[in-house]
Image: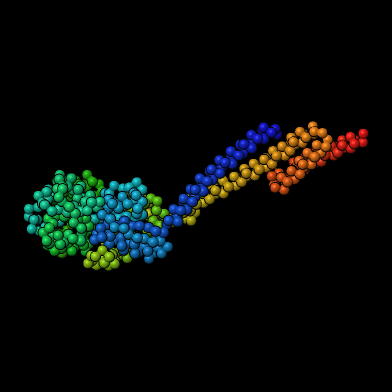
Amino acid sequence: MGRSALKMRNLRLYVSLVSMAVVLAVIIGLTAWQLGSWRRHGEWTIATGHSKGMYSALGQELKSMLNRAMPDDRFSTVPSAGSVENMGLIGDRNADFAFVQSDTRPASNARLVATLYTEVVHIAVRADLAPEVRRLEDIRALDAVSLGAKGSGTRRAAMKLLRHFEVDADPSWTAVPPGALKDSFRQRRLDAAFVLVGPGTEFARGLFSTGEVRLLSLGLGPPGGTPADAFAIRYPSFEPVLLPSRLYGKFPTEAVQTIGVTAALVAGKEVDAEVVRQVTELLFERRNELQRRESAAQASGQPMNAEFPLDFGTAADVQRHVIPLHAGADAFYRRERPSFLVTYAEVFSLGITLIIGLWSMGTLFLRWRTDLKKERIDDYYAEIRRVTRLPTEERLLALHQIRERAFDELMAERLAADDAFVIFHDYVLAEVARAEREAERSSSR
């Protein structure tokens, strides 16, 4: 092989080696990043809601249950204004799980874990004002109306109802915290309020069973022909709900037509699938434990001892939801626990790629080193050809120096101890012997 061809081959090997090193650096970086994300597994945040609301109480109980059942993980809760803010926390990756209502605009990374129960819009009007406020349209004449906190599902539902019934919200209407509603009505600081809560809950009974407020109906009618049905057609995330008479003690005195929306638990797409599968499984297996809400009620300051109206959706229900199903929840609903190989497929793939890359890089490096050593032997051959034109004494000295340098490089492993070196060494000795014979003939003359 000619020197130019050999140098070109070495150049190609060098470029291949550098390219492989860059690719491996990228793979190692991605592997480290992925492993880093797995190391973050173990601490999970649940976005709940207002401290006096259902989401907060349910979130506290869920946190306690998960921490007991999954000791290798740590779950914590973070309060919020409600569904809209919770979805924002999921989108910004500031929460891993969150309670939301099904009508909340989903973040791009939001994935459904489970549907929990139906929340119903209760439109409460102070009892002394009820004779003048018989329809939702009449609410525009009131001064103090609570629409729910900004960022809450209550406000979102209230604004949709007002828009549908062509009622302009007064800018002075504000939000009263759930825990302050009863006192606000009693002290006549509040005329009406939109309250989104599970029907029959202790919070709802405490507020609506006193006779101090009346529930406003959206209007009765034949099945499928009520104003609530029309609202549900316009906003498909909602459904008509008929609250029966005497649901809350003596009240309401007659059935109330309103609308409801599904409360759901969602998770970020990036949350580990196996963790979500376990959470989903525990939600269903320990439903009764969740319904014992004494600790949650105490944590939220509510004098309650009732059950959550949990009515988890079936696999078919969650599949129809507007938010895509999380891979971990999907595995539970299909009762397919991911195998070890499936769970860690990405790790194995990256590992195999890394091993193959390292092996290829090592092979290229060894070929490059071998060809480099061969090129150095060629350099010694070229040097010998040059010194053969020198006078005999100078030639002998140069040949011995070449031989010594070659052995030094051999010891330093810059030359390969192979057949090529043996042939080179024999060639040097032959040239030395020839030079010595020439020197003897010259001295004998």
Q: How many marks?
A: 0
Q: Can you say whether 365 is above or below 97 in the image?
A: above
Question: In the picture, residue 265 is in which quadrant?
Answer: bottom left
Rendered-image quadrant of the C terminus: top right
Question: In the picture, residue 121 is in which quadrant?
Answer: bottom left
Left/right placement of residue 241 relative to residue 400 reads left
At x 19% / y 54%, what residue is drawn?
175
Q: Nearer the viewer, residue 22 or 282?
A: 22
Left/right placement of residue 445 relative to residue 76 reads right
Rendered-image quadrant of the N terminus: top right
Left/right placement of residue 20 relative to residue 199 reads right
Q: Nearer the viewer, residue 299 or 427?
A: 427
At x 20% / y 61%, what residue is drawn?
179
Q: Position of residue 163 (x, y in %)?
A: 18, 45
Could one spot residue 208 in this view of the protein?
no
At x 72% / y 39%, what residue is drawn?
377
Q: How is the image coloured?
A: rainbow
Question: In the picture, residue 369 is in which quadrant?
Answer: top right
At x 19% / y 48%, what residue is drawn?
159
Q: Position of residue 431 (x, y in %)?
A: 82, 37
Could one spot residue 32 in this view of the protein?
yes
- Farthest right residue in view: 445
Q: Position of residue 220 (x, y in %)?
A: 14, 51
Q: Position of residue 98 (x, y in %)?
A: 32, 55
